[in-house]
Each structure stands twice: as structure tokens, then as C-alpha cells.
Amino acid sequence: MRDHARENLVKLLRRFMDEPTAQAAHEDIQAGERWLEAFAAPTPEARVLDAIEARMTAAALRKHRIRQRVRVSLSAAAAVIVLALIGLLGPDSENRPRMSYAAIIPAAIWESDDITTDDLDLAYFSSEIRQIEAQMQALDADESDRGVSGVPEEFETELMAIQTEFWKG
């Protein structure tokens, strides 16, 4: 034992025993240490050490395999539980509204052959666009007798405003 450890042992023994008893116990411990140092234990043979190491390795591998199986089993069970909960508690497909790919236009109009005549807003905007296009063509051809007044840029601005209003709804 090192000197520091011996001093700590003596202090510990003095806390629980009186001085002469603590000193006697300390001397007995030192005599036991000397006796153990004098008669060292024999070392085991190499094959015994190898057998012990093989048993320890096999036990560690068994524990590792068992832990791995438990992890895989728990992961699979958790996945099954999550999927079951999603299936049971998830939103009902019957009560869920169907997604319409043409949500802007109602289904009856979408299935029609002429969308612009079925929808009043579309019919109005398309007639306005045709009228402005006719006025622009008349200005480009210098046909002022059709009652067209103004500059072509104004008509273009009005056409763009109508188209923007159309897409905004």
C-alpha cells in the first residue's frame, strides 16, 4: 500500500476505534499484506485463460444477438402500432372532400364542350376582350369611322386590366 493510502487507513481506523486498537488493526492489515506478497497466487495455465476468454466472448455475442433481436422486434412492433393507429384514427376517406383538379371551374362546366358559353363570367370577359381586340385592329387600320376614339395604348392597358381581373376571379 502507498504511504498516502496508509495514512488514510490510519485516520479511518482512528475514527472508529480508540488509538491502541486502531494501531493494532493497522499492524494486522500490514502483516496480512506482507504475507500475501510473500505467497503469491499461482497464475493459471494459458489454456484455462483461453477457455475463460472464449466463454466470455460467446456470452457477449449471445447478449448482443438477443439485444439485436429485441431491437428489431420492438421496431417492427412500433411500426405496426403506428400504422394501425394511422389507419384507425386517421381521417376517413369517405368523409374527406374529394380533390377536384379543376377546382376553379365547377364540374358541370368542365365537362361541357364550350366553357365560355356555360360560365357567365367567362362569357362577359371573352366578349370584352373581343371588343377591345376589334377596336385595336380598327385603330391599326386607321378606321376611325367605327366610333373608336382614343389611343391604342389605352386599349392595351384596358385589355391587360381585364385579363388581370379575369385571373383574379
Image (tube, rainbow, N blue to C red):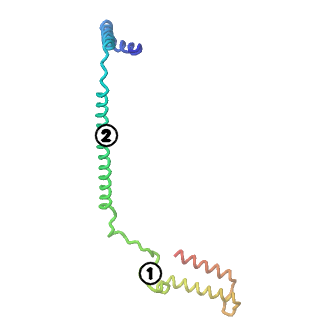
Which of the 4 image quadrants contains residue 142? bottom right
User: Which of 137 and 159 lies nearest the eye of the viewer?
Assistant: 137
Q: Which amino acid does label 2 sit on?
A: Leu
Question: Residues at badges 1 and 2 in contact (C-beta under 8 Å)?
Answer: no
1 vs 2, front mark: 2
Against 106, residue 19 (above or below) is above
Q: What residue type is labelled 1?
A: Trp
User: Which of 83 and 144 lies nearest the eye of the viewer?
Assistant: 83
Which of the 4 image quadrants contains residue 19? top left
Identify the disc placed on residue 61.
2
Q: What is the crowding at mark 2: few (fewer than 14 residues within 10 Å), some, or many (at least 20)?
A: few
User: Which of 77 and 54 lies nearest the eye of the viewer?
Assistant: 54
The residue furthest bottom is: 145
Q: What is the crowding at mark 1: few (fewer than 14 residues within 10 Å), some, or many (at least 20)?
A: some
Residue shown at 31% from the left, 11% from the top: 35
- Residue 58, percent across and down? 29, 37
- Helix, strand, or loop for circle 2? helix
Q: Give the Cα distance between marks 1 and 2.
A: 67 Å
Residue shown at 58% from the left, 79% from the top: 162
- Helix, strand, or loop for circle 1? helix
Identify the disc placed on residue 22.
none
Query: In this figure, what is the number of numbered marks?
Result: 2
- Residue 155, percent across and down? 65, 82
Left or right: 113 with respect to 25?
A: right
Say which residue label 1 marks: 110
User: Which of 127 and 33 lies nearest the eye of the viewer?
Assistant: 33
Which of the 4 image quadrants contains residue 7? top left
- Residue 70, percent across and down? 29, 46
Pointer 1 or 2: first along the chain: 2
Residue shown at 46% from the left, 78% from the top: 105
- Residue 156, percent across and down? 65, 80
Against 127, residue 69 (above or below) is above
